[in-house]
Amino acid sequence: MPVKSRIRTIPHFPKPGIQFRDITTLLKDPVGFRITITELVSRYADMKIDKVAAIESRGFIIGAPLAFALGVGFVPVRKAGKLPGDKIGHDYELEYGSDRVELHRDAIQPGEKILLVDDLVATGGTALAAATLIEKAGGTVVECCFVIDLPDVGGRKRLEQAGHAVYALCAFEGD
């Protein structure tokens, strides 16, 4: 697949044993970036989506042009303390500690259909927290969309077990 072939692997980052999947090589390639957005637009063009919500920060890079191309609104899902207006949040557990995602209270109206976007799904913790936050705001998550799935880490399965549809353009299994 053209998208997968444009993603660089950086071994032992951020720590030994981790194979970091770096989308910056995909993003700097005008053909690869265009293919990425075009394939996603093709998938979602006929679905009834009101807004694209994307997770900070690499999700913004994919989510914003996707929302633009679909002709729908864009909602940033931010880390705690980054949004200036009245906001709602959801706390979630990490392997070592906890974190929080937030969005503006008026970003999603009750009943809106939301496409959740990020660059990569690994453990699925942040995506699951973002999906929970969208539902807390009154939205319905149509699908969780990623450029990359790391199936060995289990995030896709975790999201599906929580009742969410998941789609990824490519997957990196094993090392």
Image (tube, rainbow, N blue to C red):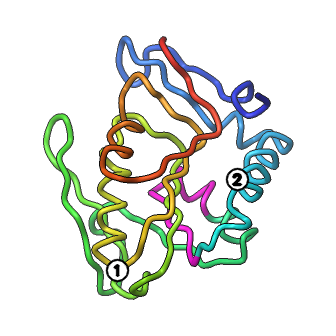
Q: Is residue 112 above or below residue 114?
A: below
Q: Which residues are magenta?
A: 50-63
Q: Secondary structure at mark 1?
A: loop
Q: N-terminal of the two: label 1 or label 2?
A: 2
Q: Local crowd at mark 2 within 10 Å, few (<14), some, or many (≥20)?
A: many
Q: Check if residue 54 falls in the magenta segment.
A: yes
Where is residue 68? Give x, y as percent. 71, 71
Q: Residue at x 30, y 63 (%)?
A: 132
Q: Residue furthest right?
A: 31
Residue 138: which disc?
1
- Residue on which the image places disc 2: 40
Q: For residue 78, which quarter of the picture?
A: bottom left
Nearest the eye: 44 or 1 = 44
Q: Residue at x 36, y 61 (%)?
A: 131
Q: Pick the quarter of the image with the N terminus.
A: top right
Where is residue 20? Give x, y as percent. 49, 25
Where is residue 161? Give x, y as percent. 32, 44
Q: Amino acid at mark 1?
A: Gly
